[in-house]
């Protein structure tokens, strides 16, 4: 067994994490995120469709997309009916964001004030990924 020594916190800075979604059509997914959630395409391979990889972002939030031909994300909501999320996006002004999306078919849970203090709502993208936007009103 190898013994490891913890690095002093000043030598390592973890800045962010980006979820990676498998999708069958990256270009269509990019278009949906741009049109509905205000994301922008920040990179892709190759430069033009059909893409095998792309990155989308809104502010500091990044989602990476990987192409897998014919992929369909399994719907596991019945196994955990109290919530099954793929990404939790922390934000300020969550009420304003919700109001800009209220009534859209992809909003899966309306704006709710949670017992732990956050305001949250859920969005389900066309690939079945669930994003929770939560934070201060």
Image (spheres, rainbow, N blue to C red):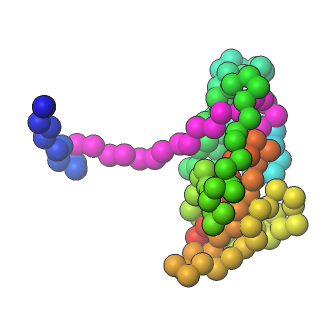
Q: Is residue 120 left or right of residue 116?
A: right
* Residue 107 magenta: no
Q: Depth check: 50 or 15 in front?
A: 50
Residue sitting at x 22%, y 50%? 9
- 119 versus 67 height, above or below: below
| Residue 120 on image: x %, y % | 65, 70
Q: Is residue 102 left or right of residue 55?
A: right
Q: Depth check: 41 or 66 in front?
A: 66
User: Over which residues does the magenta segment extend?
Assistant: 11-30
* Residue 13 magenta: yes
Which residue is the extreme one toward the front? Answer: 79
Look at the image and tell me in which quarter the N terminus lies: top left
- 22 versus 98 height, above or below: above
| Residue 89 on image: x %, y % | 59, 58
Q: Is residue 20 left or right of residue 76?
A: left
Residue sitting at x 13%, y 40%? 5
- 1 versus 61 height, above or below: above
């Amino acid at each position: 067994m190898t013994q490891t020594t913890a690095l002093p916190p000043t030598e390592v800075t973890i800045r962010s994490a980006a979820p990676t979604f498998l999708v069958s059509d990256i270009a269509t997914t990019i278009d949906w995120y741009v049109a509905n959630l205000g994301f922008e395409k920040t990179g892709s391979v190759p430069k033009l469709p059909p893409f095998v990889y792309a990155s989308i972002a809104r502010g500091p939030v990044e989602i990476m997309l990987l192409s897998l031909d014919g992929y369909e994300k399994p719907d596991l909501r019945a196994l955990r009916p109290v919530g099954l999320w793929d990404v939790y996006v922390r934000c300020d002004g969550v009420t304003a964001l919700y109001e800009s999306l209220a009534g859209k078919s992809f909003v899966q849970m309306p704006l709710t004030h949670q017992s732990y203090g956050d305001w949250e709502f859920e969005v389900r993208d066309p690939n079945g990924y669930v994003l929770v936007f939560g934070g201060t009103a």
